[in-house]
Amino acid sequence: MLKILGKKTSINVRKVLWTCEEAGVDYLQEDYGSGFAPTQTAAFKELNPNALVPVLIDEGFVLWESNS
């Protein structure tokens, strides 16, 4: 299942959530960012060196540019 890291109030995260809903893709969304889980940790920066949301994880593949 696709995992989306990022808070729902982020416009970039909302683009991904909207696309998944429209395409019928099952996903699990976890809140990261200001006021939620921090993005400035070493573990998060391993996923996205820019420490920004969203980060998409799909079976070990990590995508961190929401416009892709």
Image: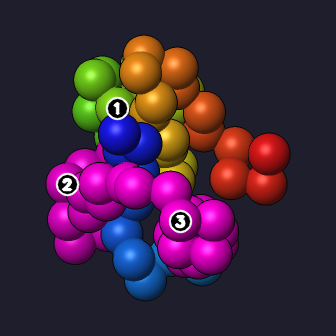
The residue under the point 27% across, 33% down is: 41
**Observer-nearest of 24 and 19:** 24
Q: Examine the rendering and report whether any part of residue 32 can be seen.
A: no
Which quarter of the figure has residue 11? bottom right
**Horizontal and vertical percent position of residue 12:** 62, 68
User: Sequence-wise, which precedes: disc 3 or disc 1?
Assistant: 3
Residue located farthest toward the front when viewing the structure as drawn? 24
Horizontal relation, residue 39 to residue 51: left or right: left
Decide: is 1 above or below 4.
Answer: above
Q: Is residue 61 above or below residue 17?
A: above
Q: Earlier in the sequence, mark 1 or mark 2?
A: 2
Q: Are marks 2 and 3 in contact (CB under 8 Å)?
A: no
Give the quarter of the image for residue 65: top right
Residue flagged by tag 2: what amino acid is it?
Ala
The quadrant of the rendering that contains the N terminus is: top left
Asked whether residue 65 is in view, the answer is: yes
Identify the residue position indicated by label 3 in the image.
24
Q: Residue 37 carries which label?
A: 2
Cα distance between the residues tagged 2 and 3: 27 Å
Closer to the camera in the image, 43 or 65: 65
What segment carries the magenta color?
Answer: 12-39
Rendered image: mark on residue 31: none
Q: Is residue 22 left or right of residue 54?
A: right
Amino acid residing under circle 1: Phe
